[in-house]
Amino acid sequence: MNTSFNIVPIGYVLKKNESTRIEIDHEYTEALEGLNGFSHIIVLYWFDKNDTQGKRNIRKVHPRKNPSNPLTGVFATHSPVRPNLIALSYCKNLGVEKNIIHIDEIDAYDNTPVIDIKAYIPMDKLIKEDVTVPDWV
Amino acid sequence: MNTSFNIVPIGYVLKKNESTRIEIDHEYTEALEGLNGFSHIIVLYWFDKNDTQGKRNIRKVHPRKNPSNPLTGVFATHSPVRPNLIALSYCKNLGVEKNIIHIDEIDAYDNTPVIDIKAYIPMDKLIKEDVTVPDWV
């Protein structure tokens, strides 16, 4: 199928004066109502610096750019090169003021486009089995 | 800024004969290498049935479609109506065979487009503070 979908930035990561925040575009301010009830949030953002067909075509990487980690498919990593450049971080919510979410930290550059915010609900409610991961993690 | 980004399906959710699997397009099979080392995966998919401007413009919902839950901004929920229609599920990885990921279950319709797969790394390594959520959760 020759489908594709359109993603728009809903805001941007701003890192200034040692503070980190997400500034949501004013048209979405209402969508933040109730977020202050959550101590943590899931932030989805876009690896915009890697948005080239060449990088989107990369299928395997050495995780964490460490050559001693085994060459691994990008879907088995959180690599910033992948077919759709979606990044996922869990952040501490330090408080929402109007269209600003103050967070503790995020592994993203200043001005990175944010594409979604979701409430963080602890995984122990969702995943009951033992979790296993490879040695490189 | 008048930016937008392009997302392509990397595969589809298939629910048949009581089995649930994700069929990845053959061009991405290599990107699954190493995924079998993870017991759980993060699946990002697209709420394609809600991809209308009207639904993307909804800013508040009653979580879980329960009118007794307080009207809440979509970014404080996992609602299937939101500006960018990205869904997130944590799934048990029952095994990867070529381009097929067998999973236990997923709250998605048959034929839903999948847009990214990420290794699941337990949150307790990432989130050390106490987590709080509103009463409706």
Image (cartoon, coloured by chain):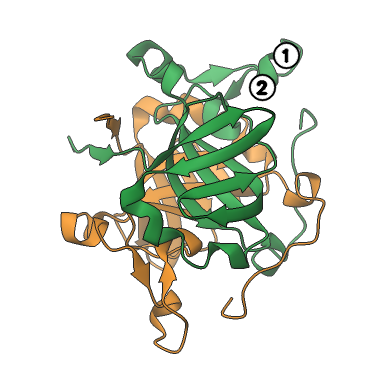
Chain colours: A green, B orange
Dot 1 amino acid type: Asn
Question: Is residue B134 among what the camera can see?
Answer: yes
Where in the figure is residue B62, as x and y percent of width and height? Answer: 40, 78
The answer to whether residue B89 shows anywhere in this view is no
Q: Quadrant of the C terminus of chain A?
A: top right
Front-lying residue, A4 or A19:
A19
Image quadrant assignment for residue A126 = bottom right
Find residue A30 and report its horizontal and vertical position in percent. 38, 61
| Viewer-nearest residue: A11 or B99 | A11
What residue is shown with label 1?
Answer: A66
Q: Residue at x 63, y 39 (%)?
A: B36
Rendered view: A21 above or below A51: below
Which one is nearer the viewer's eye here, A113 or A17?
Answer: A17
Q: Chain of mark 1?
A: A
Q: Residue at x 76, y 12 (%)?
A: A68
Callout 1 environment at 10 Å: few (<14), some (14 to 19), or many (20+)? few
Return the x and y of residue A11 as percentages of the image width and height.
Answer: 41, 40
| Residue nearer the viewer, B40 or A19 | A19
* CB within 8 Å, label 1 to label 2: yes
Give the letter of the chain under mark 2: A
Q: Where does the image place residue B40, in percent across and percent down from the top left?
A: 64, 50
Residue on which disc 2 sits: A63
Q: Which mark is residue B79?
A: none
Q: Secondary structure at mark 2?
A: helix
Task: Label 1: state its secondary structure.
Answer: loop
Spot the residue most to the bottom. B68
| CA neighbours of label 2 inside 10 A, class few (<14), some (14 to 19), many (20+) | many
Identified by mark 2, the residue type is Pro
